[in-house]
Image (spheres, rainbow, N blue to C red):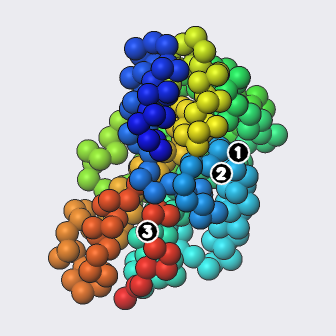
Amino acid sequence: MADGGSDDMALLLISSPRARQLFDWWQSRKPSTEKSAGLGRVGAFPGPHLILEELRSRVPRYLDDVDHGKLIYPACRRTFSDLDGDVRSVWDHTRLEAIRYLTMVPRPDFELLNSADRQIEMMDAYLLQRPHDETVIDFSGTATADFAIAIVAGLNWLTHCAKLAGVQPGRLSGTIGNFRKLVTLAHSWWLAEGAGERSRQLLANGEQPPLMFYLIWSDYTRLAKHIAAAAAFGSSINRAAKPGALPADLIARFEAAQDPLELDAGTPRS
């Protein structure tokens, strides 16, 4: 929030206690330094269409580098001596590996993820989707179902990477169930009267309504952080994990960050 006035206005826009509860929770998850997926924009959080547009170019470039052997894959297997083995890159690339499934959906209708008018439709479809444990997936040809399949595949990928990186089991337990609860709360927000207008007001103010894309991007970012921490620092974050290998302030900055782009690019590697 920019100031107390915008806080008060936002709360006045919310017509139900359940919607207000979700709004308060959602705003508390926003990064303290807000940037797009790679544009380096600071200030108001970028619209979901801007992040999606950039991801549609970033993901293929990243996978092309992987295919040509330029990068160790998955990112959680890298060490500090590897290209892009710094914690910022591992965090960012792990998130890209999860989000790639959305970019793979055939004939994707991205309005389902970022348009206020399509959120109930998309969330209904997601809540009807039966959980699966696959990361190699077959699409159905129906956009809502395919996005639901892709979202779960991304969560499964993060669970897979967590095991590879040695993340403590409790940190990523119930990943799919927790995301389902998140979507259920957001679904209630969109069912409240005036949700479309509230969403437009929030976006106009550079804030985040609980659009499906924001829910996905936020949760993938949060989960990828646990993976990057385990890959870079070991199963617990402490300065003795790799003595002498890390910049003195890196762990403190990492712990405070809510997005990999809050960390300086090109963190030195040993």
Rounded to the nearest whole Å, what is the CA distance between mark 1 and mark 3?
24 Å
- What residue is shown at x 61% (from left), y 30% (from top)? 201
Is 167 rendered above or below residue 110? below
Q: Name the residue under label 2.
A: 51
Nearer to me, 14 or 211? 14
Query: How far from the left and from the top, in percent, is residue 59?
Result: 67, 60
Q: Is mark 2 on a helix, strand or loop?
A: helix
Horizontal side of 214 relative to 21 (left or right) equals right
Q: What residue type is labelled 3?
A: Leu
Label 3 CA crowd tier, 10 Å (few <14, some 14–19, many 20+): some
Label 2 environment density (alpha carbons within 10 Å; few <14, some 14–19, many ≥20): some
Q: Is residue 201 visible?
A: yes
Callouts 3 and 2 close, C-beta under 8 Å: no
The residue under label 1 is 49
Q: Where is residue 225 in the image (x, y as percent from the top left)?
A: 39, 57
Q: Distance between the residues labelled 3 and 2?
A: 18 Å
Label 3 sits on residue:
263
